[in-house]
Image (cartoon, grey):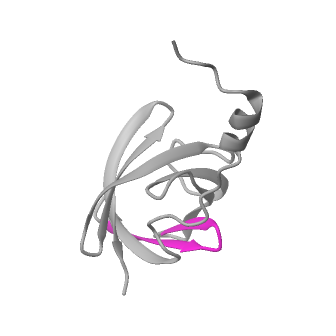
């Protein structure tokens, strides 16, 4: 028999805040359709800079050291299934040197990719 947690312990559990995840503030890159995309993580925000002055800006909330949630706060990007308020969850599944491999979930669809840290 498993006891149901008291409301006090449940409340305490919900207040757990991860201040920092595995991706430090800094710059990263990845390739999308043969073009390099610059990613910057800075002051609690995630930025993607695409060719032709397109961009995506999201609030990054670390759920664990390796799992984070992005909430889109601004974007100027055609052809993506995102809008302001969209939420995407990602987990870093492997790290090889300066490359971070991830799995993301958006609208119950899973995608995989990787970033490289810019030195």
Residue 108 percent location from the top left of the image: 46, 30
Camera-side residue of 46 and 92 = 92
**Tally of numbered discs:** 0
Camera-side residue of 77 and 3 = 3
Camera-side residue of 10 and 35 = 10
User: Most prominent secondary structure in the magenta stretch?
Assistant: strand
Magenta part of the protein: which range?
35-49
Examine the rendering and report whether any part of residue 36 can be seen: no
Q: Is residue 83 above or below residue 114?
A: above
Relative horizontal placement of residue 78, taking residue 117 as reference (left or right)? right
Q: Is residue 36 magenta?
A: yes
Residue at 58% in and 52% down = 70
Residue at 65% in and 26% down = 5
Residue 69 percent location from the top left of the image: 56, 50
Camera-side residue of 82 and 7 = 7
Relative horizontal placement of residue 41, taking residue 95 as reference (left or right)? right
Q: Which residue extends farthest top?
A: 1
Q: Is residue 89 magenta?
A: no
Residue 43 percent location from the top left of the image: 65, 74
Residue 119 percent location from the top left of the image: 36, 87
Q: Which residue extends farthest left?
A: 96
Residue at 70% in and 36% down = 9
């Amino acid at each position: 028999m498993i006891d149901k947690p008291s409301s006090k312990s449940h409340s305490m559990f919900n207040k757990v805040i991860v201040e920092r995840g595995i991706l430090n503030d800094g710059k990263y890159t990845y390739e999308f359709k043969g073009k390099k995309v610059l990613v910057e993580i800075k002051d609690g925000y995630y930025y993607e800079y695409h060719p032709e002055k397109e961009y995506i800006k999201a609030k990054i909330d670390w759920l664990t050291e390796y799992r984070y949630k992005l909430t889109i706060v601004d974007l100027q990007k055609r052809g993506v299934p995102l809008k302001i308020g969209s939420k995407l969850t990602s987990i870093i599944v492997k790290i090889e040197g300066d490359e971070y491999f991830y799995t993301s979930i958006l609208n119950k669809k899973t995608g995989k990719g990787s970033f490289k840290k810019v030195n």
